[in-house]
Amino acid sequence: MAKEKKAPKPKAQTPKGFRDYFGTEVTERAEMLAQIAGVYHRYGFDALESSAVETVEALGKFLPDVDRPNEGVFAWQEDEDGDKGDWLALRYDLTAPLARVYAQHRNDLPLPYRRYAMGPVWRNEKPGPGRFRQFYQCDADTVGSGSVAADAEICAMLADTLEVVGIPRGDYIVRVNNRKVLNGVLEAMGLNDDSQRDAVLRTIDKFDKVGEAGVRELLGKGRLDASGAYIDGVGLGEAQAEPVIAFLTSKGETAAQTIENLKAAVGDSTIGADGVAELEQIADLLAAGGYGPDRIVIDPSVVRGLGYYTGPVFEAELTFEILDEKGRKRQFGSVAGGGRYDDLVKRFTGQPVPATGVSIGVDRLLAALREKGRIGSQSAGPVVVTVMDRDRMGDYQAMVAELRSAGIRAEVYLGNPKNFGNQLKYADKRNSPVAVIEGGDEKANGVVQIKDLILGAKIAESASLEEWQDRPNQFEVPRDQLVTKVREILESYS
């Protein structure tokens, strides 16, 4: 009789493009989300938690190929009693679900509807360094208001949020542009062919990488890239390409100068003039609110996402330098972006519904704060009550109950108490600030031993004990002073 083969053991590994988050990282993110939510709430936005799963039809954006309805998303088809049902997918952002929620519940929601949402999103894309298939977003949107005051408010709120989470003024800038201005530029160029307009948009999107000279070449005959490969250009003449160059280089010393330069770039275009007027109004509203050019600027070089947005667009960029993987200095870059998208809800209602919003990349913002040294130090673990006598577990549970009631994080050691050294090793691994010890003698005398593990670690690291010799790292106190002494030690390091 053939020997039955054992089923292979599953590999204990994270799927490609995903990662696990442990204690400190989860805590840091939760604290940041609470800070951001506090700003959004102060601005009058309400929380919304929508489903992580949407129908593929509702998501819409990642459906360029009818034969692959799951393109770009993690999707599956429902099986309803043997029949094929709807395609469902994990949400790829928080804006598409908002459009569905508003269209579905619009009769019950206030107009405008102001909401914020936070949570993970999933994208079925090729992972890379720092690029994961699951990541957190933090959005705020106003649906139902066509006023540019809503756009200005989002920009102000974004600036306030960055400062609240720990990015000081001077280390960030919020840049504002307008899709209508670009439409005006394209109109001034006389481009009617959609493929040619798309090619110009793609070229404009490369401005931050290739600069003015590179854009001129790409709008014309083409250019050699860094690898030596030749990239064909759009084929425009110098005169026809000039409005694009004027648009991209129109930033002046002041908002007023930038506005005047943009007026010249759009020429006689009506939609372009509308876009410039909106930017001028946004600048005036922000100035009235005390948001100067050290925080928010009108900047035509913001071109990402212009294919999606219908009006004002904005991007928050961190301006301080970091070292890349090769040790080269570079600016940290963008951590948030958004704009006006007046056509998204229309997919459901058939009628245009104005909307504007912003999305913060939480993971990138956390990385920025670590670069600034604002977070990243190991968080303190719980006070550990050691177990000297397993038959007296009730006494130890009473201790942690008292500590917890006093608001102090604490736990009883629940491993094998036979080896006391292993209990202290556990406390070190937990980054515990204090260990509590009560053996039989301490119990009989009504005292407890309290070990300052933070000081103990410093003594162990110090080449010389002189600076620590006058500071004891273990105390014997009456049992009824347990909480008082533990709190005293903790507060001495806070």
Image (cartoon, rainbow, N blue to C red):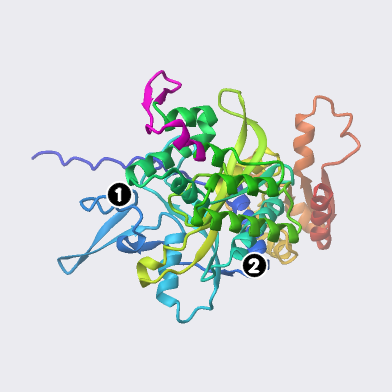
Going by the numbered disc 1, the residue's amino acid type is: Glu
**Who comes first in sequence, dot 1 or dot 2?**
2
Q: Which mark is residue 71?
A: 1
Residue segment shown in magenta: 222-243
Q: Is residue 446 visible?
A: no
Location of the N terminus (image quadrant): top left
**Residue 470 within the magenta-colored segment of the rendering:** no
**Residue 238 within the magenta-colored segment of the rendering:** yes
Q: Which mark is residue 62?
A: none
User: 398 above or below 387?
Assistant: below
Position of 389 with respect to 54 (left or right) is right
**Which quadrant would residue 484 be assigned to in this image?**
bottom right
241 or 443, which lies in front?
A: 241
Position of 249 with respect to 231 (left or right) is right
Specify the farthest residue to the right: 470
Q: Which mark is residue 41?
A: 2
Position of 126 with respect to 341 (left or right) is left
